[in-house]
Amino acid sequence: MDRFSSRRRSAFTLIELLVVIAIIAILAAILFPVFSRAREAARKTSCISNLRQYALATQMYTQDFDERFPMNSYLDGSCVATFYLEVDPYVKNKQVPQCPSERDAMDIPAMFAGFAAGACPGTPQFTGYAVNTSVFVSGFSPGVQTPSLAVIQRPSDTIMQYDGNVNFDTTQPVQARHNGTFVANYVDGHVKAISARETGASTQFSTTGVGKPIKIYTIGANGGFYKDMTACVGIPR
């Protein structure tokens, strides 16, 4: 009898099992956000690498084209050429246009589906990076000329490309995809993460209908010239 009683006492009771399950659930609730932030930190590192490559590609482009920046978009014969196509020859990795936290943020061919023959062949399909439209101007207006490097008086303060999207009014709001920050590169080539706080929601631009809602953020203090803006637009003087 004593031997059998000892065996019964060595088994877990239902209450003990429930306590263990509850502890595991509590630990999971604590650790999952930590793991999620760690994964996002890794994606931010990848995003920093992408935008560093875009900064280098843009600098090489300007050296080949009389120190002038490429246009945001323009009509090239019967199709629309974009910044992404213009610097593509200087980008070795075809994954560079895509932010790892939102790989299909902007469908470039779909955005220009209503223009002439659409996006020019060779245009990357998806990107998660917007551009400073004061540096990369639209070529759809007559007589437009892109800025030269000489116009940029504060290259270390002037953002070129950044984590963003295109809104229904064609503005390009920042997207703080990386634990409350977005990544941006600058004319001098450096890249950094900038804080932003969510302030609302809007609707994504689409030429084929209303796109998915996107978040609107206000840029934080470490955004410098772009502080309190919702998109990185303008050239600091």
Image (spheres, rainbow, N blue to C red):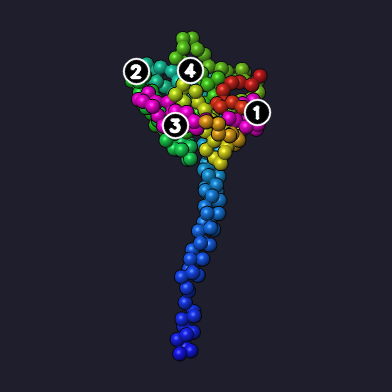
Q: Amino acid at mark 2?
A: Ala
Neighbor class of circle 3 (other Cα within 10 Å; few <14, some 14-19, many 20+) is few
User: Residue at point 53% right, 21% down?
Assistant: 133
Above or below — where is 71 with respect to 194? above
Neighbor class of circle 4 (other Cα within 10 Å; few <14, some 14-19, many 20+) is many
Does the residue at mark 3 contact the one at mark 4 (Cβ under 8 Å)? no
Q: Which residue is mark 1?
A: 224
Q: Which residue is mark 3?
A: 213
Q: How many marks?
A: 4
SS of the residue at dot 3? strand
Q: Which residues are magenta?
A: 201-226
Inter-mark Cα distance, 1 to 4: 25 Å
Instruction: Judge whether residue 65 can be spotted in this image.
Output: no
Inter-mark Cα distance, 3 to 4: 24 Å
Q: Which residue is mark 4?
A: 138
SS of the residue at dot 4? loop
Residue 60 location, quadrant: top right
Residue 126 location, quadrant: top left
> Earlier along the polypeptide chain: callout 3 or callout 4?
4
